Structures are given as C-alpha cells and as structure tokens.
C-alpha cells in the first residue's frame, strides 16, 4: 500500500478472519482504504512491533484490533501509538466472548482503547470511518448514507410485516 491514509486492521488469529473481514468489506464500501493482517500479540510480538511502526510510517490513521480470550492485542497496539485504537472482542469460549470484552475495556489510565460489542466488526468499521469523517467530508457522507440506508431498510421491513 502506498503512503496514503488507511485503517490498519489486525486480528490475533486466523480463526477470527471471517468475522473481521466484515470490517474490511464495510470500510471498502465506504471508500476507506484498509489492510488486514493476522499477527498475534503473544506468539509474534516482534512482528507486531514492526508492523505497527511500519503502518504508522505508511499513513495508518486508526487501528482496529480484534482479539479473543486474553485479548491483549488492542492494548499492546494502543501502547505503541497515540492514534485511535478500536478493540473488537471476538466471540469465544468463555461467556461467548465476555472475557475478551472485559479484557479490552479494562485498559489502564492514559492508554485508552475504544471498544465495540462482541463480534461487531461492522461497528468497528463504522467507528473508524466516523473518526476519519471528521476531516474528510467524502467519508462523512458515505457514513451518513450508510446509516440512512440502514434506517430505510428497517422502515421498509416494518412496513412489510
């Protein structure tokens, strides 16, 4: 990817790719450049360090980090940058992902991670796009159009009952 603005999406395990791909797909639909990488904070910490630093130099503007179980990935990335990090807790074996949710939202003072619901990849994408839309009117319009379409679909579904 060239030196342009993009959302870096990192997932800790290949087993979570199906869920996380929804974030990448929605970002693409909204006109937001993104790239998706599988990098474990526990099994490949040096690779994660290199990727985050490289992404920053290439224009990453927001990170979406998906993790389950111990769910350290979002916090580790947040410790390496002052850019926004969105934690995406993955559905898991303990409480359906509650363990991951609690791990991500309990960040220490001065190292925040915004957190969306368990498995809510589309919300992570929308939050990232809303952040970028603060300085990009095209992205802001794409987000507004997406929300209007969702509202229209709900109204149509309610009418057809």
Image: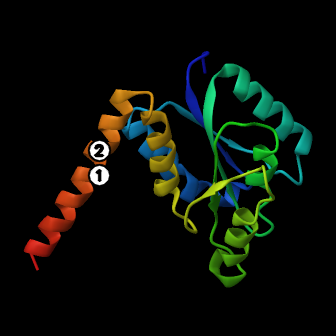
**CA neighbours of label 2 inside 10 A, class few (<14), some (14 to 19), many (20+):** some
> Which residue reaches farthest bottom?
95
Find residue 136 and report its horizontal and vertical position in percent.
41, 27
Res. 52 mark: none
Q: Quadrant of the N terminus?
A: top right
Find residue 31 and report its horizontal and vertical position in percent.
39, 32
Looking at the image, residue 58 lies above or below residue 20 = above
Closest to the observer, 128 or 95: 128
Quadrant for residue 156, please give it.
bottom left
Q: So how many labels did they put on this image?
A: 2
Looking at the image, residue 37 lies above or below residue 20 = above
Q: Quadrant of the C terminus?
A: bottom left
Q: Residue at x 71, y 52 (%)?
A: 112
Looking at the image, residue 147 lies above or below residue 134 = below
In the picture, measured across the screen, residue 129 lies left or right of residue 151, that is right
Q: CA distance from mark 2 to mark 1?
A: 5 Å
* Coloring basis for residues: rainbow
Query: In the structure shown, which secondary structural element does the residue marked by tag 1 occupy?
Result: helix
Find residue 72 and report its horizontal and vertical position in percent.
80, 58
Query: In the structure shown, which secondary structural element does the residue marked by tag 2 occupy?
Result: helix
In the picture, measured across the screen, residue 161 lies left or right of residue 28, that is left
Is label 2 in contact with label 1 (beta carbons under 8 Å)? yes
Q: Residue at x 29, y 52 (%)?
A: 147
State the residue position of label 2.
Answer: 144
State the residue position of label 1.
Answer: 147
> Which residue reaches farthest left?
159
Closest to the observer, 150 or 11: 150
Find residue 53 and report its horizontal and vertical position in percent.
79, 28
Q: Residue at x 68, y 74 (%)?
A: 92
**CA neighbours of label 1 inside 10 A, class few (<14), some (14 to 19), many (20+):** few
In the picture, measured across the screen, residue 104 lies left or right of residue 72, that is left
């Amino acid at each position: 990817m060239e030196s342009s603005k993009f959302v870096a999406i990192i997932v800790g395990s290949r087993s979570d790719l199906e869920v996380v791909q929804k974030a990448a797909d929605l970002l693409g639909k909204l006109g937001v450049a993104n790239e998706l990488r599988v990098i474990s904070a526990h099994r490949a910490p040096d690779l994660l360090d290199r990727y985050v630093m490289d992404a920053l130099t290439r224009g990453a503007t927001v990170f979406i980090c998906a993790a389950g179980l111990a769910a350290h990935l979002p916090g580790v990335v947040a410790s390496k940058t002052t850019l926004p990090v969105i934690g995406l807790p993955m559905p898991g074996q303990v409480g359906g992902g509650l363990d991951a949710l609690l791990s991500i939202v309990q960040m220490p003072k001065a190292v925040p991670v915004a957190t969306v619901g368990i498995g809510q990849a589309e919300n992570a994408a929308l939050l990232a796009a809303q952040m970028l839309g603060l300085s990009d009117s095209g992205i802001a319009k794409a987000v507004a159009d997406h929300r209007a379409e969702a509202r229209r679909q709900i109204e149509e579904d309610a009418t057809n009952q």
